[in-house]
Amino acid sequence: MAVESLMIIMKIYRNPTEEEIKCIVERPSINLASLQQTVGEVLAAVKTRGDEAVRDYEERFDHVRLDALQVSEEEFAEGEALVKEELKEAIRLAHHNIATFHASQRQEHPQVETCKGVVCWQKDVAIERVGLYIPGGTAPLFSTVLMLATPAKLAGCQEIVLCSPPNREGKIHPAILVAARIAGVSKIYKIGGVQAIAAMAYGTESVPQVYKIFGPGNRFVMAAKQAVSQQGVAIDMPAGPSEVCVIADDKANAAFVAADLLSQAEHGPDSQVLLVTTSEKLLAEVGQETERQLQALPRKDFAEQSLVNSCAVIVNTTDEAISLANRYAPEHLIIQTEDYERLTGRVANAGSVFLGPYACESAGDYASGTNHTLPTHGYATAYNGVNMDSFVRKITFQHLTQEGIQTIGPAVELMAEAEELQAHKNAMTLRIKR
């Protein structure tokens, strides 16, 4: 049972029972039902009134009246001038690594002769129009521009539309504009929240309609994405608050572990962190380090609130630790143990895995090359993060010769007849007789 508190409010479990494990891996419930009326009204208004509705909601929610929704070339140039060269170089480095890693995911699909006269193959075809949503607010996520736009460009998407909320001067954060330019995106719109999802889903006079929408957002954005996904527009994945699980043994660096926990907790008050360790000594050291590092964080309040949803668990072995991590299915899994190479083979459920003392989550969030758009809320049991395949459709082809008809024709006739689908049988029978 939870017997004490780590730091301020983080619970500690020692050798938890099955019932306690169920509590540990359970996420806070996300009730989007209460948002449906508000979200539905915005979606309907944008679908009906287009740009006019978007401008009205921008004035209401982002407190700015916009004349033009699309970012102009002058605004791109202004943003370029406002970003320091050192940050531009960092963005270029990150873009290079992300592009290198994602380009390696391209696949060749050979033709396969399944039997005499029957040849099948598969082809990757890019989604023609995709929409990217990039949050602004307390943390303008220009890194997410790279994570989404880079594989979209590599996949060959013909049209990439990016929406991000403007500030009260009607400007988008300059680093977002620079990252978009480096990643090759030129269609950027100053639209946030539900109205951005609606504009991309339905299309307006200014915003092209897209076929799939990517990107994180608050609960209103999440609810809007879920709503449009039921109306013929695909989305990247279900999403919840961000999370990390850190597995550490007595050889782990306590300062590193504390920093990893806090780097996740500072995302927001609903973020969740889980520490699983085999060492009482490390647990105590992490507690001290976390308190020390917490005091220096500008987003200290967010991090403290996040710890309400978080806990630390003491187990006997690293095998028990990895089993618990697989039950939790974290968005990010960090393994700081001596035997991390052995444990790697046991990872079954995780969005992205960080191995050894130097692979901090921040590396994957920004510049190692892997994607940081990952499944949360336990969805890592069934979903993967964004990759090249997220931006393509796999279309299958088949070609049959006369020999192929003779080879599989009788089986097709029998199966169609057994399913009482006579037209299906006839389509094959006519060819056999021919």
Image (spheres, grey):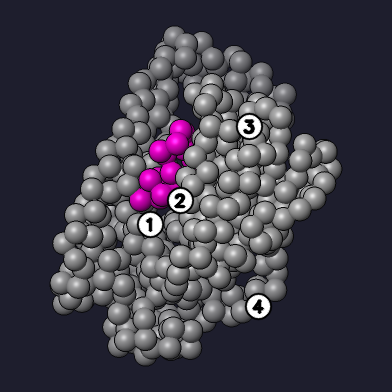
Asked where in the image residue 306 lies, by quadrant, the reply is bottom right
Between the residue at mark 2 and the residue at mark 3, the CA separation in whole angstroms equals 23 Å
Taking depth in this image into account, of 62 and 397 the one nearest to the observer is 62
Secondary structure of the residue carrying numbered label 1: helix
Between the residue at mark 4 and the residue at mark 1, the CA separation in whole angstroms equals 29 Å
Marking on residue 322: 3
Circle 2 residues within 10 Å: few <14, some 14–19, many ≥20? many
Residue drawn 15% across the image and 72% down it: 81
Q: Name the kind of residue labelled 1 in the image.
A: Thr
Q: For marks 4 and 1, give the one nearer the viewer.
A: 1
Secondary structure of the residue carrying numbered label 3: helix
Marking on residue 37: 4
Q: Name the kind of residue labelled 4 in the image.
A: Gln
* In the depicted structure, whether residue 271 falls above or below residue 65: above
Mark 1, residue position:
144
- Disc 2 to disc 3: CB gap under 8 Å: no
Q: Name the kind of residue labelled 2 in the image.
A: Thr
**Region of the chain picked out in magenta, as a range:** 350-366
Taking depth in this image into account, of 172 and 87 the one nearest to the observer is 87
Is residue 217 visible in the rendered image? The answer is: no
Circle 4 residues within 10 Å: few <14, some 14–19, many ≥20? few
Measured as percent of width and height from the top left, residue 187 is found at 27, 66
Between the residue at mark 2 and the residue at mark 4, the CA separation in whole angstroms equals 28 Å
Mark 2, residue position:
373
Secondary structure of the residue carrying numbered label 2: loop
Between the residue at mark 1 and the residue at mark 3, the CA separation in whole angstroms equals 29 Å
Q: Name the kind of residue labelled 3 in the image.
A: Ile
* In the depicted structure, whether residue 324 falls above or below residue 64: above
- Disc 2 to disc 1: CB gap under 8 Å: yes
Q: For marks 3 and 4, give the one nearer the viewer.
A: 3
Residue drawn 42% across the image and 64% down it: 133
Between the residue at mark 3 and the residue at mark 4, the CA separation in whole angstroms equals 42 Å
